[in-house]
Amino acid sequence: MTLATAESFASLDSLTPRQRKYYREGMRHGRETGVGAGHAAALRRSIASALKLPEEEAVHRVVREYHQRLDAMPSTTAYPELRGMRECVLAYNRGIVDATGAAEQDVIVNINFLHTCTAALQRSSALHAGSNLSDAPPGCTLVYFPTSDRGPLVANNNDATANYAHRNDPAWIVANRAGLILGTVSSGIFDDELSPESFPAPVFLMAQEMCGTTSEAVELLTRLNLFWGPCNALVADCRGNSAVIEKSTCRFAVRPSPDGFAATTEMAAEDPTFKRYLWQTRDRSLRARGMTHDSPDMAYWKACERRSARLLNLVDHARLDPQLAAMERIIYDHTGAPDQVHMDGSKCHPDQEAGEWSLRTTIWAINERRAQSSYAEPPVSGHLTARQWKAFDEIDYTF
């Protein structure tokens, strides 16, 4: 099987039980998130911009390179958990196609979007996010309380430019029946190393399938380090344990939480060694483009670092009296300054082309199986729009 199309599976009855689970998960993911025409068109435009190619040529290249990656199966002696994973990936993709009715190429662009943007950044340091945010992939903030007056809470700001404004309902944040929670935000790595492994191992799906605790998930994700990233990932479990993984393509740092309270935000790092590497990549990117430390990119990166410090300080205060109201104060933190947690489209530098918005803000009350959300309506920020609750009465776990 080489393509995730109807021809790949003449009969779904031919799938193994494990492949069927991945197909079902693809169906579930497709139903929850969709690959709508508007979303697919925006991703195609962004891919074309990142690759500096006409849109049709860019999409064709992404699809071709994706299938080349599928054929680059690594040693299953070195990575025994990847045995049979190629067929599981194809089954998952087919599930999305069947659930959404989307074209195969749009599904591939969607699932391969961040990898393609990362690879483009590795190929050319002239591509960056700070001064051309109109085409940057979304970034975010994630916060986890292991306990509160409403039980465990998870909060997320889905940040991007106004071009990505949406009103998509959030999915349920708990990944599997065991209670594993997984989330990621963008990392800010630009002139990164290249991984010797190109196979598109679905590491987070594998964590859903194989892991029930934070320690198990961190072990799997770091052992499969070369197959994912860069990003900042938050991992938590139903026992109240959590950790943040700060990730480049080939490097990582783990920040386990001593008490379960954890947070991470886009374009920032807190581990000292990883932070040094992050800023080294940025310095190389500036030098390659003949830019100075007065550039909008540098202003943006510094603002993200200050936002991370502010975020962690807010969490430190909240852990003394954790409540839903405290989580709201953190995720809706709005000061009018670049280091605010809740983004309002403002800029960090006069020459920055576009500002970021917190397009959707969500707080999941895990024990209640409910989530509170609000949406930005540029030029109105999300902290000024209505907040509404969604109940997840029937959660269809695959794993």
Image (cartoon, rainbow, N blue to C red):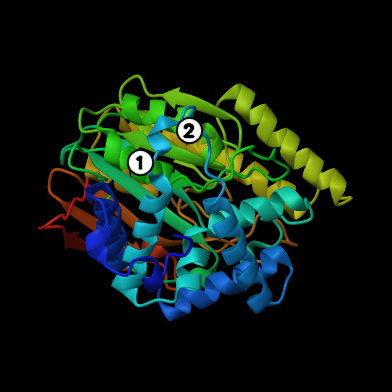
Residue contact at pointers 1 and 2, CB within 8 angstroms: yes
Residue at horizontal 15 percent and vertical 57 percent from the top? 392
Q: What residue did someone put label 1 on?
A: 206
The percent coordinates of residue 330 (x first, y second) are 38, 44
Residue at horizontal 62 percent and vertical 67 percent from the top? 47
Residue nearest the observer in this picture, 317 or 278: 278
The percent coordinates of residue 91 (x first, y second) are 34, 58
The percent coordinates of residue 192 (x first, y second) are 69, 40
Q: What residue did someone put label 2 on?
A: 224
- Regarding mark 2 in the picture, which secondary structure is present there? loop
Residue at horizontal 35 percent and vertical 31 percent from the top? 217
Mark 1 belongs to which amino acid?
Met
For the N terminus, give its image quadrant.
bottom left
- Regarding mark 1 in the picture, which secondary structure is present there? helix
User: Is residue 167 shown to the viewer in this render?
Assistant: no
Q: Is residue 223 above or below residue 328?
A: above
